[in-house]
Amino acid sequence: MPAMNLSKQTPLLLLFLLIFQLVVAQNKQPNILVIFSDDHAQQTISAYGSKLMQTPGIDRIAKEGAIFTNTFVTNSICAPARAVLLTGKYGHLNGLKDNAPGRYFNGEQDQVQKILQQANYQTAWIGKWHLQSIPKGFDFWKILPEQGNYFQPDFIGMPNDTVRYKGYATNIISDFSIDWLNKRDSSKPFFLVVGEKATHRNWMPDTADLGAFDNQEFPYPANFFDDYKNRKAAANQDMTISQTMVLGNDLKLGIDYTKPGMFGRMNAAEKKLYEGYYKKIKAEYDLIKGDSLAVVKWKYQRYLKDYLSTAKSLDRNIGRILDYLDKAHLAENTIVIYASDQGFYMGEHGWFDKRFMYEESLRTPFVMRYPGVIKPGTTIPNMVVNIDFAPSILGMAGLQVPATMQGLNLVPLLKKEPLIKPWRSSMYYHYYEFPEPHRVAPHFGIRGERFKLIRFYGKDNSWELFDLQNDPTEMNNIFAQKSSQKTLQKLKKELLELAKQFKDQEAVEILEKEFQTSIL
Ligand code: SGN
Ligand code: CA
């Protein structure tokens, strides 16, 4: 045998090693980081075209990855949306349909983090949790009790101790998240959920952001002065800026900072800054308080200023987490997802809060960066529903999706692969919580690409039909119009099919009972 020629073999060997390493790297399970905020409206995110403020942190994820322009939730409310994130199932199947006191999430059921944990992932949830029961399937958790506090928040840590921390919640949640990332077992991939408290009511900005929007006058949504004509449930709610939003806790006028509670938790320096700032605001209010039209407009302007200032810290902290991933050389192999638990009204229909199946709260922001898989600058217009989050996370980790999960795996959309069957063209919604705290009637419905059909039940028993193409602000209920009847029959049938497909027995019964007496 001829002697080996090492000088010739070495480059070949190196090439082989390089290819081998590349294959291994490509098959490496990706880290998955989910930043899940609270009540953050698409209307306030510049990646979604907002002119209200700039959100460079969120925009960066969209620019370096994908923006999903049609993402909807199954039930626009906090704890139920979190249960959907973990289970990939509707509330009637995962057991969490509302936020009512005494309600808690059954952690014994199958959840995305449990499956990831079995597949070698290190799992953690840090921040707002709101599911009442102790997290299961997380190697580490540190959570806010209930809604938590913006200043000097308490955190419940493992195994079950409550400790008060100094500082502002959004900053502390990032600190804890970065700290966990630093200390984790780096031989394993990670799944981390950063549960943000921002931008939940009562929108308390970090002191650094007080007054950040004082020079801005915000435009009023086209339907700010909604008369709720032909929409009984919309007329009967309790979530208007004019009536429900209060000058005290919400708009921070006349606060007694010596009393215990969310303002009393501030330290002396924070109190001084808040007191000084809102004293000036109170003086502004005193000048117009006799004029009811001026007051409602003023309340809207103040609501937006506080909300956007709170969002400013949220976005800055998202940027901080992205910078950390860069510095720690984790960005390449980490999928970053940003989403909110649901959308929010920023004055549309004269409201704040969420719950209704109208667009602003039905939609939720959703952007994702996935290096090597998603082409930077991608727009994904397909209809996504939050039941898709869990199956997609499993799909991205290369794991089997259990048949009991009700959502779709987004991986083919991310890879722009040809689809085996057409993507969904409608989604199903069901909201339950009534009457507290905002008197929104329970309802279920279907949102198609053009039309939306809603069935309110209980006290406000009624139907609503909207043509989103001709009436994007959902002001004109065309349910009773003769010209709508053909569309209506088709949608009613599809609604019943969806309720059956998603095993929503309660809705199926309401519909079947009614359809027995009317012709489909
Ligand atoms: C609190 C708020 C409500 C809000 C719910 C649910 N009132 O009760 O306005 O709808 O939380 O929000 S507050 O005066 O206490 O702030 S959710 O995001 O947790 O669903
Ligand atoms: Ca929420």
Image: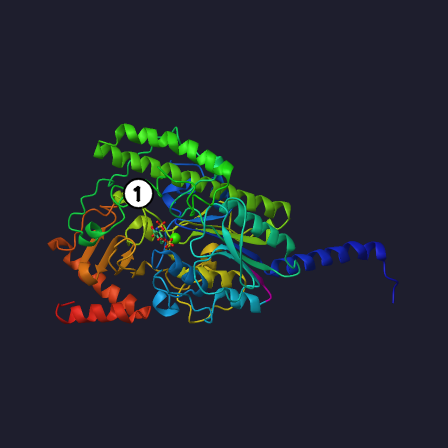
Image quadrant assignment for residue 440: bottom left
- Label 1 Cα crowd, 10 Å radius (few <14 / some 14-19 / many 20+): some
**Residue 178 image point, x, y percent:** 59, 50
Image quadrant assignment for residue 18: bottom right
Q: Residue furthest left?
A: 482
Q: Is residue 309 above or below residue 102?
A: above
In which quadrant will I find the N terminus? Answer: bottom right
In which quadrant will I find the C terminus? Answer: bottom left
On the rendered structure, is 206 left or right of 447?
Answer: right
Q: Find out whether residue 208 is within the magenta segment.
A: no
Q: Is residue 192 above or below residue 310?
A: below
Residue 19 in sight here = yes
Disc 1 marks a residue whose amino acid type is Val
- Closer-to-camera residue (302/82): 302
**Residue 295 image point, x, y percent:** 26, 34
**Residue 148 image point, x, y percent:** 45, 52
Q: Residue furthest front?
A: 258
Secondary structure mainly formed by the magenta segment: strand
The magenta span reads: 120-124
Numbered disc 1: secondary structure: loop
How many numbered badges does the structure rendering display?
1
Q: Find out whether residue 122 is within the magenta segment.
A: yes
Image quadrant assignment for residue 47: top left
- Closer-to-camera residue (201/193): 201
